[in-house]
Image (cartoon, rainbow, N blue to C red):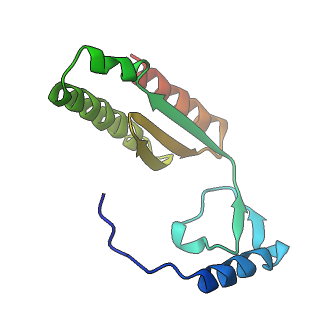
Amino acid sequence: MESNNTIIYNVDNSASRIDDILNSSNNNFYDSKKIPSRDSLTYINGVYVDVTSIFIDIVGSSDMTDDHNRPTLAKMYRSFISESVAILNSYYECKEINIHGDCVWGVFDTQMKSDIDDVFHVQRKLIV
């Protein structure tokens, strides 16, 4: 993965940032009915919001290296990740998707019970 924002780490700047966070007002935290936009979040504010998350992982994937070579494994992982992301993206309530190794997870904005029910529909599609 490429980094396009390399900045030299400075301990003094770090200490200042930490002080700003620790000294920020407790009034900077609020409840919300939905996940806020990323650009409204900072290091000195926070939002309490109800969400539902789902984690999808290939069970026993570390043992797959015993039976398959690298190109085959790469194709299997990419197919799994591609389709998992496609299914998650097909739901409006899914607001965040992340991939870590062979694990794919999604965070859903679940304001209503029907939204939570949709997450169960996602799960059923992913375990077939």
Left or right position of 23 against 125: right
Toward which corner of the image does residue 60 lie, by quadrant?
Answer: top left
Taking the view exactly as shown, the residue that stands out farthest to the left is 71
Q: Is residue 73 left or right of residue 127?
A: left
Percent of width and height locating residue 46: 70, 66
Residue positioned most to the right: 26
Q: Is residue 119 left or right of residue 27?
A: left
Q: Residue at x 28, y 15 (%)?
A: 66
> Which image quarter holds the N terminus?
bottom left
User: Where's residue 91, x and y in %?
Assistant: 43, 41
Question: Which quadrant of the figure contains the C terminus?
Answer: top left
Against 68, residue 49 (above or below) is below
Q: Toward the viewer: 112 or 63?
A: 63
Relative image position of residue 95 (x, y in whole percent): 49, 51
- Between 46 and 120, the one nearer to me in the picture: 46
Residue 72: quarter of image: top left
At 15% across and 30% down in the image, what residue appears? Answer: 71
The residue lying at 42 percent from left, 42 percent from top is: 100
Reply above or below: 81 against 33: above
